[in-house]
Amino acid sequence: VLCWRMYNVELGVKVDPGKDFCGVSAELLAVVAGRLGIKDEGMLADTDVVVARKSFDARTKKDAEPRFSYTLDVRLSPKTARKLRLRTKQGDVMEGAGAPPVATGGGGGGPSVVVVGAGPAGLFAALELVEVGMKPIIVERGMPVERRGREIGALFHRRILNPDSNLCYGEGGAGTWSDGKLTTRIGRNSENVRKVLETLVAHGAPERILVDGKPHLGTDRLVRILRDMRAFLIERGATFRFDTKVEALLTRGGGDRGAISGLKLADGSEILADRVILAVGHSARPLYERLLDSGVSLEAKGIAVGFRIEHPQEMINELRYGAEIASMVDRGKGKVPVADYRLTQSLGADKSDEARQGSAKRGYQDRSCYSFCMCPGGQVVPTSVDPKEVCVNGMSFSKRESKWANAALVVSLSPKDVADDVFALEGAEAGNGPLRGVRWQSAMERRAAEMGGGNLVVPVQRVTDFMAGSSGRDADLPSSSYRLGVRAGPLHELYPSYVTEGLREALEAFERRMPGFVCDEALLHGVETRTSSPVQVERNADTLECPSMEGLFPTGEGAGYAGGIVSAAVDGIRVGQSVAMQVLSAAMSA
Ligand code: FAD
């Protein structure tokens, strides 16, 4: 049987059955047959066609009907292919481009490897290790998902914030109480991205994530998948130690390069280890300080900061689809998905080349503003791990049926931007240090907490008031999905003016592109500061080991090598494979 991949097969929303996402309908089969020039009905069966990818295309042009766009694998016998005169590459049909095979590991055993952090990076690294017969210990400061769920309930209903088990910390990591979007910018068809998606399906995710152009899971599904993954890892010899916080590295040797000998825990006890996979996410701030104390080299990274913007979901559906198609959404239950958006704007587009070069020389990058981590049918949630700091993010359940749509709206900052601000706030040492981004984030989160009045109340401002520079009044605020209370505040005064002006410039551009986006119903929530890690832990590009600390393998978002669930998981896979390879080759040469 030969496999032909067919791109850009489209079905209008009114024709597409919509609901059976992976299925091949008679309408779809007819389009494929037409494309291949098949007239004889019996020549192509629905079993010959497999949906490899399916996306909803909202089309912004007025007269174009929104449609589903398919990538299909069409399997034909050589005889049929000959009859149809299909060649290796014919227009948008390509031979032999089916899904890549999933890689598998080898056997073996090995000395002690500890994985710190049970987020996507840590868990996928651990899966690689058990695949070759190793038995890693997984140390996680937060709780298993069942208990974590209760703690998040206590946070939402009684304002009790457990500093070690919350929206950022606990089994599954930061992405568990999230929208569970599985989109990534690292290439949907790469072997490791496929592997992540297929592993999630093996642990209970719906198969549609393998074909959906914008796959997402939702918190409810993620929790079930994580329980299954934990059982699988334990069955293969991994040990989980929840409620166990790592405070520092134990090291031996000195000079230019130390070596890992284990970990010091917050309760004073120690775990010995030959190799440590460090997958602690972007909120492990005190641990960064301890890494520096141990001689691990860290570098400041650029960050992106701003607010979370929330609109009524129905309004976004109408802005994106128009009224007729928006009526087919039915709060996530209809055949048309709840609408999302992705907006980007280069700031200061009118800057001369000379001015741009001058800034680049002084270490400032051109800034951009973009929407990020959009949660249709979701809610704004607190991601603070300390009540003296306030920051927010977004989550949703699998059905995406809440009446709100939220997204981060952030401006990118270079390490130089941040250095200047931290220098002004805390002096030269902090301003020049590798942790200046952490200090900058924390300063803004403290300002937000003060503006909200404490107790995790979030300062908010109508977008129209933000644009006009007026504080607004509580009485005029539209409703918000944030459950711990909101209070009107002058968010336009919270950040340095270049951030505020950047957001205003971008919002004006977004309004031109999506008229109605800037309106009284749109509410900014402060602050969205933790979109990525402000630090990168140095590591060797081939071995993925830290050059300044033998046996330390930094991975995932916190180490500065990933952003998002799938890319963190992929980075975890790469690091897990590298550690497994190192251990197995050491065993073979011993
Ligand atoms: P993390 O997931 O942060 O995991 C790190 C783990 O290390 C945590 O469990 C933490 O408890 C543990 N840890 C930290 N310090 C210590 C210590 N000292 N000792 C022991 N354990 C420690 N991304 C998407 O792709 N799609 C989304 O829809 C999405 N929504 C999000 C919604 C929210 C509310 C948040 C907060 C994030 C969201 N993200 C989303 C981002 C995504 O969650 C992260 O990019 C991803 O989880 C990073 O994975 P990681 O494994 O590198 O780190």
Image (cartoon, rainbow, N blue to C red):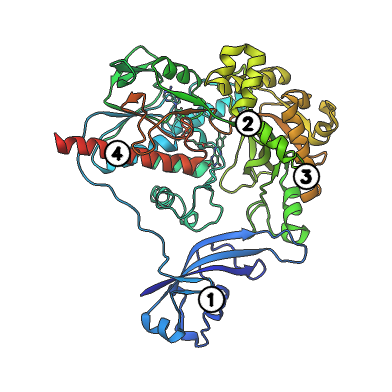
Residue 280 in sight in this render: yes
The disc at residue 129 is: 4
Question: Do the residues under discs 3 and 2 have CB atoms within 8 angstroms?
Answer: no
Whole-percent x and y of residue 264?
Answer: 35, 16
Q: Which numbered tag is attached to residue 32?
A: 1
The first of marks 4 and 3 along the sequence is 4
The residue that label 3 is drawn on is: 509
Is residue 505 left or right of 338 when viewed as pictured? right
Residue depicted at x 50% and y 32%: 149
Q: Residues within 10 Å of mark 2 (few under 14, many from 20)?
A: few
Q: Which residue type carries mark 3? A: Ala
Q: Position of residue 327 (x, y in %)?
A: 73, 58
In the depicted view, which residue is nearer to us: 88 or 573?
88
Mark 4 or mark 2, which is nearer to you?
2
**Can you identify the residue that label 2 sits on?**
361
Q: Secondary structure at mark 3?
A: helix
3D distance between C-alphas at marks 1 and 3: 40 Å
Q: Tag 1's secondary structure?
A: helix
Q: Which image quarter holds the N terminus?
A: bottom left
Q: Nearer the viewer, mark 2 or mark 1?
A: 2
Q: Position of residue 212 (x, y in %)?
A: 53, 57
C-alpha gap between disc 1 and disc 4: 43 Å
